[in-house]
Image (cartoon, rainbow, N blue to C red):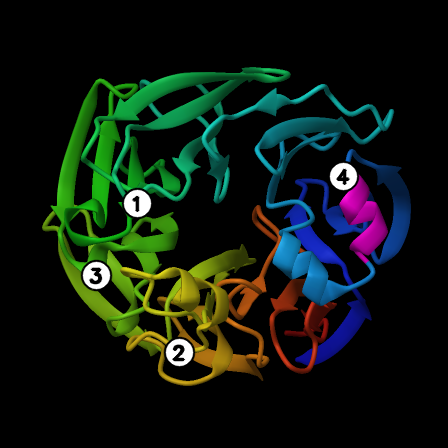
Amino acid sequence: MFLYKEADHTSPLCCLQNGSFIWYHRGKVIVVRDGILKKSLAVTVSFLERLLSWSQVISRLMRFGVRAAYGINNNNIVLSISNILYELNLDTGELSEGYFFEDGIRPLSFSSVNSIQGFDDGLYFGGYLSNNDKRPVSIYHRTGINKWDVVYTFPEGTINHVHNIVADPYRNCLWIYTGDFDEAAAIWKVSDGFHKIERVLFNNQKYRACVAFALSEGLLYATDSPYSDNYIYLLDPDTLTLKEIYPIHGSCIYGCQWKDSFVFSSTVEGDGRNLNKWEFLFSKKRGDGIKDNYVHMYMGNLKNGFNEIYKEKKDFWPLYTFQFGVFKFPYGVNNTDTLFFQPVATVENDGKLMGFSYPSNY
């Protein structure tokens, strides 16, 4: 397996079914296929981003760039920039007017739902926002260009935000992972087009997760707890029992599927509870669930097991103001021979687009 570096200040956004990858670089969306740059398309960014995006540290401070993206099809992608969801036509370069969300709502990730009994096909996401007082949080479904309909709302006092929605074709349902604390850390089973919603597991950091995959054997996921031990788990949907698959060094926010393997990255972050202003601005103290000052990458599957394959050290900048140490991956299933990722807030390769490539006989 070979590790290489592609470009500075370049974020992996998503991969398309035709094998193309979508990158973001300083106000431009880049289409790459088979290692060849096919297109470079300008998108809407603020004046400050155009002026200051030369600095990766400033970009982290200002939260510049695309927060999340997903391929609607091979010609159209949805982009989350600030609190606006845009749609970009890759053929024409046309960018939609966008759909604005109030109150800081944005997707942590998008989820594609197809052929799940009782549900309309398409893209979904759950509201992700700072929400300590547990205001109502909704689930949204894309019904057209710049059209997002609310399909369900968690009542006030229930959750802080939605981490992920997982379509499960093996059990004809959706699973929703919510966070962050106490009873808000939960796994919900959704059936019959959001007419039946069950909170099946809750009130434990074992059920707090951002990255999960529906398999025939159950739900494979990694926990996202900054103050408890973290594991890759397999949840049996019938008995609701957990099996520890592999211990990880910290909370997991990002991951992906690469061919028949699953990739998770650990995070270097603080405790996250009861932060005062000074701690938010300047703290470098890790939460108890973060075992060291490195971002770790793990890869494997249920047949062959999991192993750590890479790590980088977190840089010296404060955790909250200048972002956690993470590895980010392109959204969507990656069936190519290269695993792309971007280290963020690390000493060696902060903001670089990187990749692992296997020999052809792997």
Secondary-structure class at tag 3: helix
Of circles 2 and 1, which is in front?
A: 2
Which residue is rendered at x = 46% and y = 28% of the image?
A: 114
Q: Earlier in the sequence, mark 4 or mark 3?
A: 4
Frontmost of labels 2 and 3 is: 2
Q: Secondary structure at mark 4?
A: loop
Q: Position of residue 197 (x, y in %)?
A: 19, 28
Q: Residues within 10 Å of mark 3 (few under 14, many from 20)?
A: many
Q: Is residue 92 visible?
A: yes
- In the rendered image, which residue does mark 3 sit on? 206
Query: Residue 46: which numbered mark, if any?
Result: 4
Write down the quadrant of residue 163 in the picture.
top left
Residue 178, compared with residue 206, is above or below; it is above
Q: Label 2: which residue? A: 285
User: Disc 2 residue type?
Assistant: Lys
Name the residue rendered at 48%, 63% in the picture: 320
Q: Position of residue 161 (x, y in %)?
A: 34, 41
How far across and how far down the image is residue 117, in percent?
32, 22
Q: What are the residue bounds of the magenta stretch?
A: 46-53
Tell me the CA gap for discs 1 and 4. Answer: 32 Å
- Answer with the quarter of the image where residue 171 lies: top left
Q: Which tag is nearer the camera, tag 1 or tag 4?
A: 4
Q: Which residue is mark 1?
A: 177
Of the numbered discs 2 and 1, the one sitting upstream in the chain is 1
> Label 4 to label 3, Cα distance in Å?
39 Å
Nearest to the observer: residue 265 or residue 269: 269
Asked if residue 31 lies left or right of residue 210, the reply is right
